Image (tube, grey):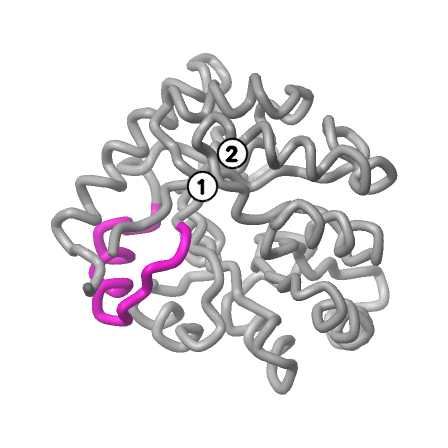
Amino acid sequence: MSYLWSVFTKPWSALPGDELGRLVAGIGFGGAEVPVRDTAYVTPANAGAELPKFAAQLRAEGIEPISVASELSEPVFAACAEAGVPLIRIMAELGPDGYAASVRRNRELLERAVVLTERYDVRVGVQPHHGRYVSSTLGVLQLLDGLPEQFKLVWDAAHDALAGDHPAVTLELGAQRLGIVNLKNVHYVRTGDGWRTNFVEAEDGLSDWPAVFATLRQLGYDGPICLTGQYSDVSTPVATRLERDLRFAVTSAAQHPSRE
């Protein structure tokens, strides 16, 4: 089974669905994650009216909406159910009260969402994120431990590398929870204020994408692959970089094809 090559459409979050669908189809994608945020075309406040139309416009251009990046409110769950969007992606934010208290707070948020996942048949995906979030795959898996199967891991190549982990380890450990595989890449650069993260193209960062696909093949994963379109250098159009990264990802996957 081939992967559904998808893209996080945050770089074009102000576009309506028909324009967005044509743009990402032209790059070569067949799926999309849509931001449903206050700064985007579809917001949590208007999602009930706009997301079903937006998703239909994407599908008319050959783009399947795989998820939304949003919040765990009932209006967003209801809008996803109406639009046929299967998953809401979030991150587990850390507050000033420290890691342990933040994890408890995030766990309570997820537990309150259990009834919404059942009511609307929409899953929740939690992604690790470097910095002020639960930053490791293992931390997210601990956060999800004991929750129903509707709660998924959104594995992220760049943030996994920033955590000092390797895909052969974390993908295997997260295999039973794996909902989406995010692909981007990153390294550190030294600045006058110390080291900072620099998001780069596929072949230039810490994450080994061919190793990702080798592990996915071993696991028999056939879910969505989502390129997130995050690049620190804005001198080159995002679409141009994504075209190159998609070619590299497809080539890497062909060397390590998913299990039929």
Percent from the top left, x then y, of residue 2?
Answer: 26, 51
Residue shown at the point (59%, 28%) measured from the top left: 57
* Rendered image: mark on residue 236: none
Residue shown at the point (61%, 38%) measured from the top left: 34
Instruction: Check if residue 216 falls in the magenta segment.
Output: yes
Residue annotated with mark 1:
188
Q: Which residues are magenta?
A: 206-224
Q: Nearer the viewer, residue 50 or 165?
A: 50
| Amino acid at dot 2 | Arg
- Tell me the quarter of the image containing the N terminus: bottom left
Residue annotated with mark 2:
59
Residue shown at the point (47%, 59%) measured from the top left: 155
Q: Residues within 10 Å of mark 1 (few under 14, many from 20)?
A: some
Which of pointers 2 and 1 indicates the residue nearer the eye? 2
Percent from the top left, x then y, of residue 171?
Answer: 37, 68
Q: Nearer the viewer, residue 212 or 219?
A: 219
Percent from the top left, x then y, of residue 250?
Answer: 23, 40
